[in-house]
Image: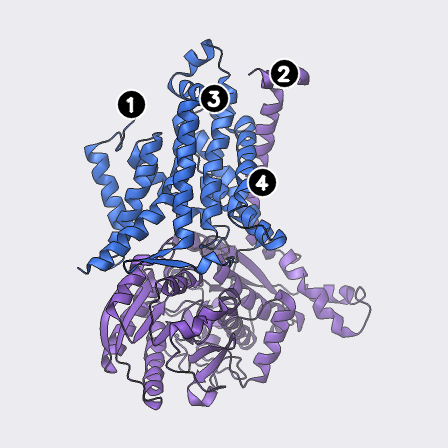
Chain colours: A purple, B blue
Amino acid sequence: MSKPRGLRAWLGHGDALPRVALVVFLAVALLAVACQQQTPQQPGKPAAPAQEAPKPAAEKPAAQPAQKPAQPAKPAAAVAGVKIGVLHPLTGGLAFEGKQVHNGVLMRLEEANAAGGIKSMGGAKLEIMQGDTQGKPEVGVAETERMIRDGAVAIMGAFQSAVTFPITQAAERQKVPVVVSVAASDEITRRGFKYVFRQQPNTDIYAKQGLTALKELIQRKNANLSTFVIIHEDSLFGTTQAGHMERYGKELGFKQLDKIAYKATTSDLTTEVSRIKSLKPDILLISGYYADTVLMMRTIRDLRADIPAIIGMANAAMSNPKFAQEEPKLAEHMIDVNYWWDPKSERAKKVREAYKQKHNEEMTNHAVQGYQSADVLVDALERAGKADREALREALTKTKLGNLIVPGETIEFDERGENKNAQPLLLQFQKGVPRAIAPAKYAEVEPAFPIPKLEERLR
Amino acid sequence: MDPRLFAQAVVGGVLNGGVYGIAALGLALIFGVMRIINFAHGAFMMLAMYLSYWAFTLAGVDPYLSVMLTVPTLFVIGVVVQRYLINHVLEAPEHTQLLLTLGVALIVQNAALALWSPDPRTISTVYTRTVWYVADVAISLPRFIAFAAALVASALLFLLLTRTDLGKAMRAAAEEPEGARLVGIDVAHIYAVAFGLGLACVAVAGTVVLPYFRVSPDVGDVFVLIAFVTVVLGGMGNLAGAMLGGLIIGVAESLGALLPGSLKHLVVFAIFVIVLLLRPQGLLGARR
C-alpha cells in the first residue's frame, strides 16, 4: 500500500511531482481554451493561416517557381482587406454538417482571393474571420457580435435555423448584412428584416415543391400512395419544416396519420419507429440531421418497417454520399428533397472536382449551398465597390447572379431577402450515388418508385 | 393503446436503460468514493468508443473483444488522471473540482476533434444487423448484448466491492476516509483505483454501444448527460440506485416517445423532479 510513497521518496521531494503536473495541466487547459477562442480571431489578421493556405495554391498557375510570385503579391495586400465573418457549428453534435457548409463557403471566398481579390476595390482581399457556434444560439450571437465589433462587413452562417434566427436579429440591430449559408426555416425572413439574404429554398418552398413533385411522381407511376407520417427533429428547422409538410400534404390531398417529433441528440428511436410501423403509412417524410437520420434508418431496418416511399425533406443524410458509404443497402433508392448542384452545370462539375481534390470527399448539398451563398456575397461585394455595410446591402438587394452551380437561371432576392428562383430537386440514391429525378428539366435518371420492399433492398 | 407497441417501447427502454445504467455506475462510484462529479465522463466514453473503433478498423479486432483493450486502457488513464490531477482538488471547493473535470473533458473532446474530425463514424458487423423477434417484439442483437454486458459488468463491480479486500477498503475509504487511514488503508491509492474503475465502467458502455451507435467527438453527451440525472435519481453515490435509475430513465424515455410531441425528455425530467421532491436522497438514497 505504500507504493506511491516509495515513488515520492525516490523523487526526493514529497508532493512536488503531482503539484507540477497539476500546474502544467492547468496551463495546458487554459491554453486549449484560449486557442479555441483565438483561432477564429486569427484569420482577422492578413497573415492568418486559414488564408495563407490557399495563396500558394492560387499562385501556382502563374507558371513561375512557387516562391517568386509571393513577393509581388505583397504590395497588393496594402489595400485594406474586406472582413467577412463566417460562422458555423464546428464542434458539438452538428460539427459534421457544419464543417461541410464551412468548407463550401471558405472555398468560394478563397477562390475570390486567389483570383486577385475584389477588383472593384482595387484587388482588396477578403479577410475571413471564422467562428464556431458550437451549435448553440447564445454562442452564435456572441460570435456574431464579436465579428461585428471587429469590423465584419458581412456575416455568413450559420447552418442551423435555431442559431441563424437570433444571429440575424443581432446583425439587423447593427445593420450588418447576413448572407445565410444554410438555414431553412422561413421564420428567419418573416420578421421584416432588411439585412438578411438567403439564396437557398426555405422550409415552405421545400415542402411545397417537394410534395408537389412527389404527387406528380406518384401519378406518373400510378402508385396508390395516399397516407403519410411526418417525423422531424424538434428544433426550429424540423418543426417549421414539419408544419409546412403537414399543410401542403393535406392541400395536395394526402392523408396525414401522425406527426412525430424527436430530439436530434437521442440515443434511441425504437419507440418512434415502432409507432410509425404500427400506423402503416404509404409515405414517410423525414426532416432531420445526419446522425439521427442514419439511426432512424437503421431502426427502420431492425424493426422491418416496410414503407413504400421514404422521403427526406431537406434532410442531412438522405442525399449525403457518406450515408451510401456507411449503409449502402439502406441508402439505395432513398429519396430526398434538397437544394443540390445543377446536374447540367459545367461550373458545378468543376467546383465539385476542386472540392474533392481539396477535401478528399464528395461535395455534399451543404457544401454546395455554402459555396453558392458565398458566390452571392462575392458578386455583391464586387458591385458594391467599397467595403461598406450599407453599400453591400444595396448591392445584395440588386443581385441578379447567373452561372450558378445550383438549379435555376439566376439568383434574385425579393423584399424579404429570399431567392425568388430557389429550386429544390428530388434526388434518389441509385447505385450509391444521389441522382436528380425531378423536376423533369433537371432529371438525370428514371426514378425507381415506389421503392422495392425492404427485404429485397436488404438482400 | 396497441399492446405490441407498448411492449416494444418497454423492451427498447430496458435495453437502452442498461447502457445508461452502466455509464451512470462509473459516475456513481467516483462520486460515492471521493465526492467528485466527473464531468469528463462522457469524453472518456467517447475515447473508449474511438479505441474500439480503431481497433476494429485498423486491426480487425471484434468490437466486443476490444473490451479487453478499452477497459484496461481507460482504467490506467483513470488512475493517472486521479493521481496527478483529481487528487489535488479533493479538498478544494466544488467549483474548482468542476473546472478541473470540465477542463479534462474539453481537452479530450477537442483533441478527438482535431485528430479524427467531427465525422460520425460507424462500424458494420454481422451482428449489427441481427434482430430477434419475440412475439412480434423486435430485439436488436447488439442492443441486447449491450444490455447484458452492462448487467455483467455491474455484477462484477458489485462482487468486487462486497467480496474483496480492495472492495472493502474502497467502501471504508468512502464511508470514513480518516478512519480508513487509521487502520492502514492507503486512501490515496484507493481513490486512484476507484477512479480507474469508474472509467472502466464507462469504457464498457462505450465499447458495447459502438456496434449500433455512431462515434463522433460529441457522442459522450448523448449517453452521459442523462447519466448525471440517473445518478441523482438513484441516490448520489449509490451503485444499485444508478443501475435502477438508468433502467427507469430508459423506460421512461421510451414510453414518453409514445406521447405526442417530443415529450420523452420532459417525462424523464418530470420523474426526476418528482423523485427529488418525494425522496431528496434519491430512490435508494444513501445517507449523508
- Quadrant of the image occupied by residue A242: bottom left
Q: Position of residue B36 (x, y in %)?
A: 42, 29
Which of marks 2 and 4 precedes in the sequence?
A: 2
- Quadrant of the image occupied by residue A124: bottom right
Q: Are marks 1 and 3 on the same chain?
A: yes
Q: Residue furthest top?
A: B182
- Label 2 packing within 10 angstroms: few (<14), some (14-19), many (20+): few
| Residue at the (58%, 33%) spot, across then down | A25
Which residue lies under the disc numbered 1? B287
Q: Marks 1 and 3: which is nearer the front?
A: 3
Task: Say what amino acid the circle numbered 2 marks.
Answer: Gly
Tell me how far mark 4 sits from mark 3, CA to CA: 38 Å
Which residue lies under the disc numbered 3? B166
Marked residue chain, label 1: B
The answer to whether mark 1 and mark 4 are in CB contact below 8 A is no
Which residue lies under the disc numbered 2? A6
Q: Secondary structure at mark 1?
A: loop
Which residue lies under the disc numbered 4? A31
Tell me how far mark 3 sits from mark 2, CA to CA: 20 Å
Marked residue chain, label 4: A
